[in-house]
């Protein structure tokens, strides 16, 4: 059980809830903060106009709602619930609900705590709303959350086509905008992709070390002296890790390696840097009260108030995603080159394309094409989304971050990168096996386990269908701890 307290929520916990591995519960302090925020918002709305409570929204912000009119909230939810495209998977929707619950627990929205409790019950019952891919533009995921509200009300079917176990019997106008004023879906997609990429990049470091060994790389590029001269602590850390992994390799085959081996610390370090920056930002966003308007103060103490703002514009998140995508797009060039060199007898001492013999067999030739296709997708995703903009709502909203597009593309980058890393693992495993290498020459226990795991993926050098090999390798690199022997075996 994960407690949602509005103060801290680990990204790994969000991933666990998204995977369906655990339930959530709101803390008592979170419910108290939401109740206090609701009182503050009501007191403020009695004193001055408040956007979305006593006025319309968007270009209708100048329209004053009739006092006592309570149908506006339902109208707002129904009108904003339209989305389109394919339905998102259960994991993404669960992550969205978890993030939204955590944001509401901060106590800055003024929403009725009973709605947050209903959201908690929806998540724990796995009675999920159907959320589709097109709707958000990085200025709040209005359609996704309005559709969630309609599902909570029983007006929409759940993702399974069923009904919510216990539907809400109404939705006050004062609770409509506060519920949908959030980028919970965009943040959730970024969290899931970040957690997957963190595992994938950790395994990429191990796979790169296996390729380094298969090509008898020169470990001078990983030396402490080089690490001390690095321009980033992450580069130095990667150099040290790689140096420890390949300890025991023996004499290098070359005085100086190709870039794909020699620049491994810089390439992997830059990705690690961007992953770290994105993690820090996401950890703030999942416990940030960004609803517009922001509710603050105490009704009891007379310090109540609201602040109309633009924090919902996910400009920083869009830029962080762009930076990570650029690092991934750059890194994949070295993956492709290592895959190519593993096919070259000059670097492995084996037959061309790691074939069983030199009589014209193709070996892993086509794996280069598979990896190149995935790299093309990854590089396409590296085109910045933070330069996009749009003007909407009769000119009332004249910009958008499109972080929602970036977060969605980050998920597709996971699939592309896992394919590239999986292909490199298949190639390195085949090379190491055909070279007759064994893990006992290496000092690092984690590397020895990864080495043995890699060799277990290799079965037969004769020309055959390599799809099962790639599938098994991709599955392996998406699981935590390639060096802990958790990969599937083909044998």
Image (tube, rainbow, N blue to C red):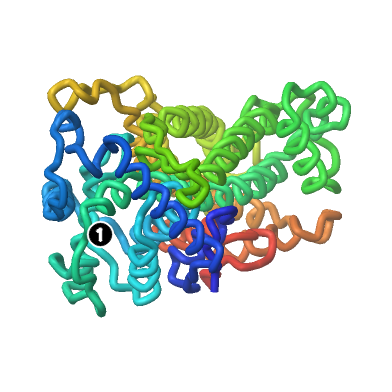
Q: Could you say which quadrant of the image residue 454 lies in?
A: bottom right
Residue 333 in view in this figure: no
Q: Which of 461 and 314 is in front in this view?
A: 314
User: Which residue is found at the position 35% from the left and 30% from the top?
Assistant: 380
Residue sitting at 43 percent across and 71 percent down?
A: 20
Q: In this view, does 450 lie above or below 185?
A: below
Q: Residue at x 17, y 70 (%)?
A: 154
- Kindly identify which residue carries mark 1: 148
Dividing the picture into quadrants, the one containing residue 404 is top left
x and y, in percent, of residue 76 in the image: 16, 48
Across and down, in percent, residue 430 comes to 58, 54
SS for callout 1: helix
The answer to whether residue 123 is left or right of residue 32 is: left
Where is residue 467 drawn, in percent x and y? 39, 58
Vertical order, 255 against 24 (above or below): above
Using the image as rendered, state which of residue 163 and residue 362 is in the foreground. 163
- The one of 59 and 472 positioned closer to us in this rendering: 59
Q: Is residue 121 left or right of residue 246?
A: left
Seen from the viewer's position, the closer of residues 235 and 312 is 312
């Amino acid at each position: 059980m994960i407690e949602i307290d509005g103060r801290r929520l680990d990204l790994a916990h969000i991933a666990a809830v998204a995977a369906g591995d655990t339930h959530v519960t709101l803390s008592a302090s979170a419910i108290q903060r939401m109740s206090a925020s609701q009182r503050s918002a009501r007191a403020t709305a009695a004193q001055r106009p408040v956007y979305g409570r006593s006025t319309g929204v968007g270009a209708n912000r100048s329209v004053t709602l009739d006092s006592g009119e309570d149908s506006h909230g339902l109208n707002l939810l129904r009108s904003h619930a339209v989305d389109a495209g394919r339905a998102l998977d259960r994991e993404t929707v669960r992550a969205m609900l978890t993030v939204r619950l955590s944001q509401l627990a901060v106590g800055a929205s003024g929403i009725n705590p009973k709605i947050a409790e209903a959201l908690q019950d929806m998540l724990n019952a796995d009675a999920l709303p159907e959320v589709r891919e097109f709707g958000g533009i990085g200025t709040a995921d209005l359609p996704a959350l309005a559709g969630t509200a309609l599902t909570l009300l029983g007006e929409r079917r759940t993702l399974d086509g069923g009904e919510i176990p216990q539907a809400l019997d109404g939705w006050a106008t004062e609770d409509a905008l506060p519920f949908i004023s959030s980028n919970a879906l965009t943040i959730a997609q970024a969290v899931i992709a970040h957690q997957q990429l963190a595992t994938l990049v950790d395994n990429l470091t191990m796979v790169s070390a296996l390729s380094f060994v298969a090509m008898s790389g020169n470990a001078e590029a990983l030396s402490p002296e080089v690490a001390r001269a690095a321009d980033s602590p992450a580069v130095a850390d990667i150099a040290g890790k790689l140096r420890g992994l390949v300890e025991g390799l023996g004499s290098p085959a070359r005085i100086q390696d190709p870039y794909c081996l020699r620049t491994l610390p810089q390439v992997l370090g830059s990705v690690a840097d961007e992953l770290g920056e994105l993690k820090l930002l996401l950890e703030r966003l999942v416990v940030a009260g960004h609803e517009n308007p922001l509710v603050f103060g105490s009704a009891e103490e007379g310090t109540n108030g609201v602040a109309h703002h633009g924090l919902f514009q996910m400009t920083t998140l869009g830029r962080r995603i762009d930076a990570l995508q650029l690092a991934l797009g750059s890194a994949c060039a070295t993956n492709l080159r290592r895959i190519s060199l593993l096919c070259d007898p000059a670097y492995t001492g084996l037959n061309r394309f790691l074939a069983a013999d030199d009589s014209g067999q193709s070996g892993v030739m086509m794996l280069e094409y598979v990896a190149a296709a995935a790299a093309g997708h990854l590089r396409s995703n590296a085109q910045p989304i933070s330069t996009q903009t749009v003007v909407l709502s009769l000119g009332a909203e004249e910009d958008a971050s499109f972080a929602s597009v970036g977060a969605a593309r980050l998920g597709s980058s996971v699939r592309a990168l896992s394919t590239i890393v999986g292909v490199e693992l298949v190639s390195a495993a085949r090379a190491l096996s055909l070279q007759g290498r064994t893990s006992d020459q290496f000092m690092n226990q984690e590397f020895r386990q990864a080495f043995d795991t890699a060799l277990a993926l290799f079965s037969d050098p004769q020309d055959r269908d390599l799809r099962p090999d790639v599938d098994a390798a991709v599955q392996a690199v998406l699981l935590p701890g390639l060096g802990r022997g958790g990969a599937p075996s083909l044998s």
